[in-house]
Image: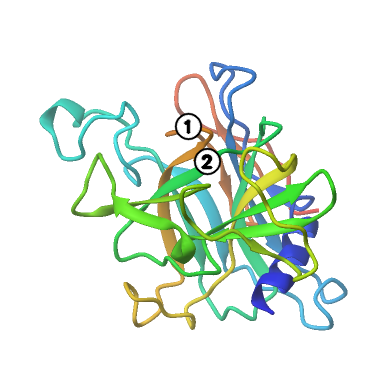
């Protein structure tokens, strides 16, 4: 039930509040991860509006070294270490979610991956990939259902999660969905969604932290190790000027 509800939220949420797009220096056809949040109205949520308790942001110091080097090594000390914060500071039932829209999605997917920091939330429901196919079906690949191995850049503090034909569960939205086949099923949209709150506990967060810290999002081995943008439903779209200062675009939630 949680997964079905989440799809409705994300479909509407894509139209609400996005973080700033990535800098122009990124290749035009390379995948990007653009932050977004959804905070539902009473009409969208069956009578009870969502709350301003969600955040999706690329932040310096939050991730592993962007250059691929080992975390904690003096050689990477000056690296920006950009990573993604996904936060839901309240109950899972609140009609709100945070996430990332993956752009420039390939026609078919052979592999999906990301790294998460140990101790932050990794459940079967969030963070997860939402996969929408050209045939109109939706599938979920939740963090807890992936293949877990120590992350290369920091094997003691970070975990790598992968989904491919070799392993990792991709669950259908409905039992009547045809099977999702890596390398065969044609994909229309791809996103990462976080909608499990502080009342949803996990093996690594027995008290329920309501947030996940991820990095190195990968689609068919194309790794997104850095980005920009903050989406929280309150400040609109914020990007950076050439001198590194904030450039508030002045877009509100409407």
Q: Which mark is residue 221?
A: 1
Q: Secondary structure at mark 2?
A: strand
Q: Secondary structure at mark 1?
A: loop
| Most foreground residue, 192 or 242 | 192
Q: Quadrant of the N terminus?
A: bottom right
Q: Residue at x 53, y 24 (%)?
A: 241
Apparent side of residue 27 relative to residue 251 in the rendered image (left or right)? left
Residue 245: % across, % down: 47, 30
The answer, for residue 229, to whether it is visible in the render is yes
Q: Residue at x 13, y 34 (%)?
A: 73
Residue 128 higher or lower than 248, as above or below:
below
Residue 241 higher or lower than 124, as above or below:
above
The answer to whether the residues at label 2 and label 1 have Cβ atoms under 8 Å apart is yes
Q: Which mark is residue 111?
A: 2
Residue 246: % across, % down: 52, 34
The scheme the figure's colours follow is: rainbow
| Most foreground residue, 132 or 227 | 132
The answer, for residue 252, to whether it is visible in the render is no
Residue 142: % across, % down: 53, 62
Few, some or many C-alpha atoms within 10 Å of disc 2 (few <14, some 14-19, many ≥20)?
Answer: some
**Label 2, label 1: how far apart the Cα atoms are:** 7 Å
Apparent side of residue 159 relative to residue 43 in the rendered image (left or right)? left
How many numbered markers are drawn?
2
Q: Residue at x 42, y 65 (%)?
A: 122
Residue 34: % across, % down: 61, 40
Q: Disc 2 or 1, which lies upstream in sequence? A: 2
């Amino acid at each position: 039930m949680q997964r079905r509800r989440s799809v409705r939220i994300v479909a509407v949420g894509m139209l609400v509040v996005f973080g700033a797009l990535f800098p122009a220096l990124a290749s035009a056809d390379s995948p990007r991860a653009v932050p977004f949040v959804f905070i539902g109205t009473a009409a969208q949520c069956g009578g009870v509006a969502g709350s301003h308790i969600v955040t999706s942001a690329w932040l310096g110091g939050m991730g592993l070294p962007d250059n691929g080097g080992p975390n904690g090594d003096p050689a990477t000390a000056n690296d920006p270490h950009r990573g993604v914060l996904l936060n839901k500071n309240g109950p899972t039932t609140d009609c709100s979610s945070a996430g990332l829209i993956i752009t420039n999605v390939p026609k078919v997917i052979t592999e999906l991956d990301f790294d998460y920091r140990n101790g932050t939330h990794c459940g079967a429901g969030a963070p997860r990939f939402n996969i929408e196919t050209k045939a109109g079906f939706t599938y979920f690949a939740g963090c807890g259902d992936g293949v877990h191995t120590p992350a290369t850049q920091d094997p003691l503090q970070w975990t790598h999660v992968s989904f491919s034909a070799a392993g990792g569960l991709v669950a259908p939205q409905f039992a009547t969905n045809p099977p999702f086949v890596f390398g065969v099923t044609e994909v229309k949209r791809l996103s990462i969604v976080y909608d499990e709150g502080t009342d949803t506990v996990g093996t690594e967060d027995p008290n329920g932290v309501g947030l996940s810290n991820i990095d190195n999002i990968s689609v068919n081995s194309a790794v997104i190790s850095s980005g920009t943008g903050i989406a929280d439903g309150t400040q609109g779209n914020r990007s950076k000027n050439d001198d590194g200062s904030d450039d508030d675009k002045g877009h509100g939630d409407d």
